[in-house]
Image (cartoon, rainbow, N blue to C red):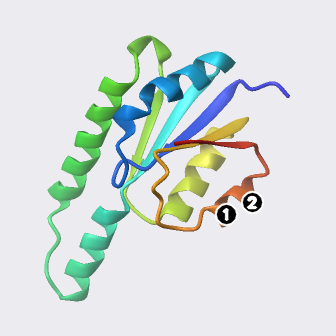
């Protein structure tokens, strides 16, 4: 199997990915593949849903700022010469992961900082691609 494109899914809300960055870079560099990085900010979506359920306005700048902050952190974690593409999404993990997966069409999926307090088996079964866990 030829691995040319990798989708790395990181849980930056619950995990400390800075401790794992060397492992992540080693794996990606081993394959000499293009890298797309996905971070799903479920907590921002939950805050928005709660505010709306109470009839309160939700500040759209909170969502934008969260996306910008995580994107900046990602830019500092990965070397520029890797040319990684960053996908920072606010929403449900399964929906966002499936959408980015279809867009990117990777040969391999990496899960890192996996403190996902959710069942990822549904997503992983739907892809049919090899998934490597880095913790």
In percent of width and height, residue 38 lies at 48, 43
Left or right relative to 43: residue 95: right
In which image quadrant can residue 126 be found? bottom right
Give the farthest residue toward the right: 1
Categorize mark 2 by other alpha carbons within 10 Å: few (<14), some (14-19), many (20+).
Answer: few
Compared across the picture, whether 93 is left or right of 102 comes to: left
Q: Position of residue 96 (x, y in %)?
A: 51, 57
Q: Label 1 crowding class (10 Å Cα cut-off): few <14, some 14-19, many 20+?
A: few
Mark identifier at residue 40 = none
Residue at 59% over, 17% down = 29
Q: Residue at x 17, y 71 (%)?
A: 58
Q: Is residue 15 above or below residue 123?
A: above
Residue 130 coordinates in the image, percent (x, y):
75, 43
> Secondary structure under badge 2?
helix
Query: What is the x, y in percent for residue 116?
Result: 48, 59
Q: Is residue 86 above or below residue 92?
A: above
Give the residue pinned by disc 1.
121
Q: Give the position of the N terminus as an image quadrant.
A: top right
Q: Is residue 106 visible?
A: no
Does the CB distance between marks 1 and 2 fall below 8 Å?
yes
């Amino acid at each position: 199997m030829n691995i040319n494109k990798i989708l790395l899914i990181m849980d930056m809300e619950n995990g400390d990915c800075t401790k794992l960055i060397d492992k992540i870079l080693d794996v990606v560099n081993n394959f000499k593949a293009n890298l797309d990085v996905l971070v799903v900010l479920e907590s921002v979506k939950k805050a928005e849903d709660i505010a709306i359920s109470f009839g309160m306005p939700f500040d759209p700048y909170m969502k934008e700022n969260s996306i910008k902050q995580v994107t900046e952190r990602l830019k500092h974690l990965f070397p520029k010469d890797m040319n990684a593409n960053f996908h920072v999404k606010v929403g449900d993990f399964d929906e966002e992961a499936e959408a980015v997966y279809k867009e990117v069409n990777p040969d391999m999926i990496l899960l890192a900082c996996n403190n996902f307090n959710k069942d990822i088996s549904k997503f992983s079964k739907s892809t049919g691609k090899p998934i490597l866990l880095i913790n």
